[in-house]
């Protein structure tokens, strides 16, 4: 799969589980960690876990290695590492507190609606 297809898969998986306020940051040339950060939040611990689990399931279903998942049990900030794409699934309060969008404010955002297009 191309990087854009993987990005689309991650965003769709989050969207399918009704993730709130999905933001895609283009981290190319800004962070050595990943090319894209997908940031979203759920409104309950169960929803946060469902979003993260759906991302993991979709990745594995398409033969993509999930490098690691952190924070799943606590369901406050779950990180799903797919290599060039890292998904950050937050509980709402944690998202407001850590505010990754502001922390990485120099990163351009991708149009989520365009990413979701087939």
Image (cartoon, rainbow, N blue to C red):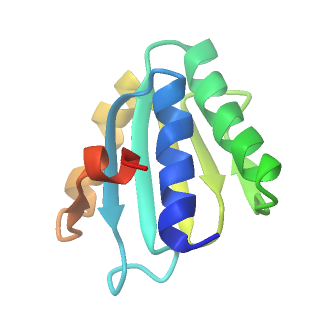
Vertical arrangement, residue 51 with respect to residue 33, above or below = above
Q: Residue at x 57, y 17 (%)?
A: 47
Q: Position of residue 69 (x, y in %)?
A: 72, 48
Residue at the image position 49 percent from the left and 58 percent from the top? 7
Q: Residue furthest bottom?
A: 29
Above or below, comparing residue 20 to residue 115 in the picture: above
- In this rendering, the count of numbered labels is 0
Residue 49, x across and y down, in percent: 65, 25
Compared to 30, does 48 lie above or below?
above
Q: Is residue 7 left or right of residue 53?
A: left
The quarter of the rendered structure image containing the N terminus is bottom right
How far from the left and from the top, in percent, is residue 101?
Answer: 25, 52
Nearer to me, 76 or 47: 47
The residue furthest front is 118
The one nearer the camera, 44 or 55, is: 55
Residue 95 in the image: x percent, y percent?
Answer: 36, 35
Residue lying at 32% horizontally and 61% vertically, measured from the top left: 25
In the figure, is residue 106 to the left or right of 82? left
Toward which corner of the image does residue 97 lie, by quadrant?
top left
């Amino acid at each position: 799969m191309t990087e854009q297809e993987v990005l689309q898969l991650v965003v769709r998986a989050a969207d399918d589980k009704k993730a709130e306020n999905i933001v895609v940051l283009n981290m190319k040339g800004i962070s050595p960690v990943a090319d894209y950060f997908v940031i979203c939040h759920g409104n309950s611990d169960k929803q946060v876990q469902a979003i993260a689990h759906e991302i993991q399931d979709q990745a594995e279903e398409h033969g993509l290695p999930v490098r690691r998942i952190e924070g799943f049990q606590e369901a406050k900030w779950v990180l799903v590492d797919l290599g060039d794409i890292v998904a950050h699934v937050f509980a709402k309060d944690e998202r407001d507190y850590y505010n990754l969008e502001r922390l990485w404010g120099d990163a351009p955002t991708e149009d989520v609606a365009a990413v979701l297009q087939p």
